[in-house]
Image (cartoon, rainbow, N blue to C red):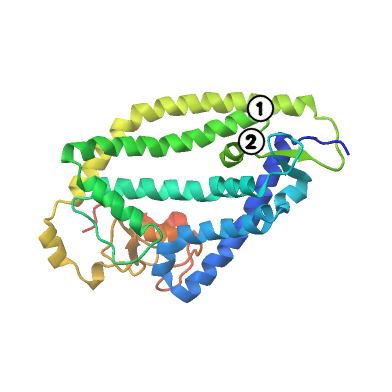
Amino acid sequence: MPLVPANQPQLIRSSQKDEYYQKNLTNNANELFHTFAGSRRWLQWRKEIELLSDLTYYVLTTLSGYQTLGEEYVSIIQVDPSQRRIPSRMRRTALILFHSFVPYLLDKVLICVENELEAEAPQTSRTWSPLSHVRLWIQRAVGMLTESQRKALVPLVFALQQGITLLYRLHVAVFYITGAFYHIGKRAAGVSYLRVGHVSGDDPWIRNSYRLLGALSLLQLGITLTLQFNNLRQRQRARQQWKQHRNLLPSLQVSQSSSRSSRCILCLEERRNTSCTPCGHLFCWECITEWCNTKSECPMCREKFQPHRLVFLRNYN
């Protein structure tokens, strides 16, 4: 039976199909966890639930030696760099780690570093999380830095976060041109795809269309990168102005004036970036937007509304 490399449309359709089933699995896990643990715990563990859902999907398919639902849908199989054997168990394990766990860990670490660098005082968390030891290590490392060093590292962390996003876009543009390795994790693990079953020749027009799309993506990426460099200083200046505006009141006065009416019922802490639902209830902007990702209703009165109707109260005290 002839085997030829999978083309761009097959790899994209396979990835979309896998993402569809992964999203369904994640949504069911979120709903189950939210029902039994409540909103506060769900907001704290939502990233870990998504990670566990992805790991479960790939352990039951890729690690077990089976095709994923997306791969089965387009009739493609994984092969190692030799293009003659299926990947070994160790290579499949590396693929799962590179594809799911490494992006989660990198995102968590960068957010933790950014929060510690911008914090006025060391932050202490009473709740346990999977990265508690990493957070403590980062706190000790940041505590050894001077104020000027912290200010210098903040834009570097922000540039690194933006650079990771641009790297993903660059990788997709290269995939459009070359037709191999749609995901960075598969490139790192050396896992590619072959077509099985009915094999027909590639349409040159389709391949050329994807190459043109890749060239346009590279052009757009270059323009975006230029704008990112031009706007980096403006973003940092806006952050500093917002930070000064938020800290106008002394910390002692803020702590004395806080009451139950100024607390967000989702995170049970003092509201940050107060936002209002159409029914008039107030929440943290981060909390209510995360809530709306799964339920388009008010957490208090259950009134239905569309997320775009949320109002960010800029000058609310």
Task: State the image coordinates of residue 238 (x, y, percent, origin top left).
Answer: 26, 39
Quadrant of res 66: bottom right
Residue at x 40% of width, y 63% of height: 44
Residue at x 42% of width, y 57% of height: 289
Q: Secondary structure at mark 2?
A: loop
Tell me if I can see residue 65 in this picture: yes
Q: Secondary structure at mark 1?
A: helix
Q: Is residue 277 above or below residue 194?
A: below
Task: State the image coordinates of residue 189 (x, y, percent, origin top left).
Answer: 60, 40
Task: State the image coordinates of residue 266 (x, y, percent, origin top left).
Answer: 36, 67
Q: Amino acid at mark 1?
A: Thr
Q: Which residue is mark 1?
A: 178
Q: Is residue 33 above or below residue 5?
A: below
Is 266 on the left-hand or right-hand side of 174?
left
Residue at x 77% of width, y 37% of height: 84
Label 1 CA crowd tier, 10 Å (few <14, some 14–19, many 20+): some
Tell me if I can see residue 118 in this picture: no
Is 157 on the left-hand or right-hand side of 307?
left
User: Which quadrant is home to the C terminus?
Assistant: bottom left
Q: Amino acid at mark 2?
A: Phe
Task: State the image coordinates of residue 120 (x, y, percent, origin top left).
Answer: 19, 50
Quadrant of res 24: bottom right
For the residues labelled 1 and 2, the Cα–Cα distance comes to 9 Å
Is 176 on the left-hand or right-hand side of 204?
left
Is 10 on the left-hand or right-hand side of 106?
right
Q: Nearer the viewer, residue 280 or 223?
A: 223
Q: Which residue is mark 2?
A: 181
Disc 1 to disc 2: CB gap under 8 Å: yes
Quadrant of res 203: top right
Label 2 CA crowd tier, 10 Å (few <14, some 14–19, many 20+): many
User: Which quadrant is home to the N terminus?
Assistant: top right
